[in-house]
Image (spheres, rainbow, N blue to C red):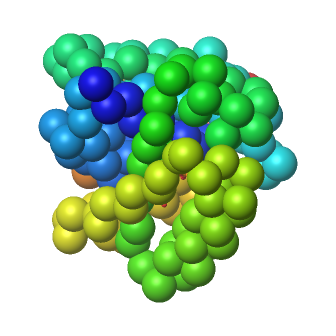
């Protein structure tokens, strides 16, 4: 049985992420979406909120689950008895980041391999930071994120917050 881990900060979860997760779940026996609890960048949503977004998004995917983690990704992957790390690629700049990650992963854990899935064309321009920027400016984000994430963005970014 091949277990794969899809790690990220997912702040917030958007359709590009969900597309990668669903396609990875179709490729591997079990998929664990791993939500990094305290990334170096500033996050808008708590790890519990980001986990909640994934649990809702994955409710129809029986072989996928979401978990939080706060340790080195390769250590988490080993803890989960997984052997594959899944990442998504949109543009060349993603490739530069991911190949560096792949090299360091190979150095730290030669038993773990990294698989990158190309984004689907319709999601190629979506990123969590673009979604937040549009939402902050009061623009529509319904084509980028599921309704529950849209609601969460609206609540978090409302002037009373
Ligand atoms: P990071 O892990 O660098 O904080 P994210 O949490 O936003 O970044 O993304 C997690 C993973 O999902 C990364 O591999 C990223 O390249 C990928 N990803 C982000 N947006 C998309 C998209 N629109 N299509 C495909 N993959 C994506």
**Residue furthest bottom as drawn:** 92
**Residue furthest front as drawn:** 111
For residue 101, above or below residue 41: below
**Residue furthest right as drawn:** 40
Residue 87 image point, x, y percent: 45, 54
Q: Quadrant of the C terminus?
A: top right
Relative to 111, 44 lies left or right: right
Q: Quadrant of the N terminus?
A: top left
Q: Is residue 130 visible?
A: yes
Residue 110 image point, x, y percent: 60, 52
Residue 24 image point, x, y percent: 27, 42
Relative to 91, 19 lies left or right: left
Q: Name the one closer to the observer, 135 or 105.
A: 105
Q: Quadrant of residue 103?
A: bottom right
Residue 98 image point, x, y percent: 56, 68
Q: Is residue 141 visible?
A: no
Residue at 83 percent across and 48 percent down: it is 40
Q: Quadrant of residue 120?
A: bottom left
For residue 62, above or below residue 156: above
């Amino acid at each position: 049985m091949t277990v794969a881990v899809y790690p990220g900060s997912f702040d917030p979860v958007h359709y590009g992420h969900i597309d990668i997760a669903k396609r990875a779940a179709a490729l591997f026996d079990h998929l664990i979406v791993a939500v990094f609890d305290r990334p170096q960048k500033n996050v808008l949503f708590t790890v519990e909120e980001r986990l909640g977004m994934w649990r809702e998004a994955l409710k129809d995917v029986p072989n996928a689950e979401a978990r939080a983690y706060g340790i080195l990704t390769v250590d988490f992957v080993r803890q989960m008895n997984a052997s594959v790390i899944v990442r998504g690629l949109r543009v060349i700049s993603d490739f530069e980041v991911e190949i560096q990650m792949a090299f360091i992963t190979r150095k730290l854990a030669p038993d773990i391999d990294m698989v990158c899935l190309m984004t689907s064309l319709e999601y190629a321009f979506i990123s969590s930071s673009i979604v937040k920027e549009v939402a902050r400016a009061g623009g529509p984000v319904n084509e980028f994120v599921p309704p529950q994430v849209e609601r969460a963005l609206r609540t978090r970014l409302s002037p009373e917050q």
